[in-house]
Amino acid sequence: MTHFYEPKLGHQLKHDPFNAIVGPRPIGWISSQSADGVLNLAPYSFFNAFNYVPPLIGFSSIGRKDSLNNIEATGEFVWNLVTQPQVEAMNQTCKAVPPEVSEFEIAGLSTAPSRLVSVPRVAESPVSFECRCTQILQMKNLQGESIETWMIFGEVIGVHIEERLISNGIYDTANAQHVMRGGGPADYFSIGPEQLFKLYRPAN
C-alpha cells in the first residue's frame, strides 16, 4: 500500500510531506543589506548549490521578503553556514520583524567584514560565501501563471573557511557539525563522522 495524493487537492496528512522527503536540506542563512545600509539575516530552507565553475548557489523566497528586496537593490549577499553552535541564533533570525530591525541584533550575533562585497558575514559562522546576484526569477505554475515565489541565484566570488575545518587540504564536512533542515514543524538534522562513507565513481 502507498499513500497517493495530488498536491493541488491536499495531502491529507498532519504535515505536508514534500519538504520532509526532499531533505534534509542545507540552510540558506543569508545576510543582506538594504540600500540604506540596514542589515538583514534570514534562514531559507530551500537552498542549494547548482554549479561548479563558476560556483553558483541559489535560494527561494516564498513571498517578497527583505532579503529579496535587499538583493534586488544592491546585487550582493552572503551565505553563512549553520553549524550546531549557531542553531539557537539561527532560529532567532526566523522572527518576522520590520525591515528596519536587524536580525543580527535580535540573535546576539556579530558581523565580520567581507572582502569583496559590502554585506557583512556572520562572525560566528565557520564558513561563508560572498556572492553577487546573477539572476532573480519569479516562479510559475503549470498554467504559466507567476506565483509569489522568487529564486535568487548568486555567483560565489569569495569563500571564508576556518582553518580548523581543513584537514590535509580537504574540507572536513564530517566534523564541521553542519545542521540541515528537515520537514514538519521543527525537524532538523546534523551531520557527523558516523554518517560518512566513501563511494568512488566507477572507472571509465
Image (cartoon, rainbow, N blue to C red):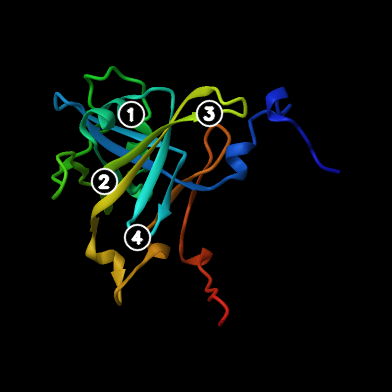
Q: Which residue is identified by label 3? A: 140
* Residue found farthest to the front: 144
Q: Quadrant of residue 143?
A: top right
Q: Residues within 10 Å of mark 3 (few under 14, many from 20)?
A: few
* Residue found farthest to the bottom: 203
Q: Residue visible at 33% across and 29% down? A: 68
How far apart are the alpha carbons under marks 2 and 4?
14 Å
Instruction: Name the quarter where the C terminus is drawn.
Output: bottom right
Relative vertical location of residue 162 with respect to residue 29 in this rendering, above or below: below
Residue 23 in the image, given as x and y percentages of width and height: 55, 47
Label 2 vs 3, first from the N-terminus: 2
Q: Nearer the viewer, mark 4 or mark 1?
A: 4
Q: Which residue is identified by label 2? A: 131
Give SS at disc 3.
strand
Q: Residues within 10 Å of mark 4 (few under 14, many from 20)?
A: few
Q: Residue visible at 37% across and 48% down? A: 57
At label 2, the amino acid type is Cys
* Residue found farthest to the top: 98
Give SS at disc 4.
loop
How far apart are the alpha carbons under marks 2 and 3?
25 Å
Q: Which residue is identified by label 1? A: 68
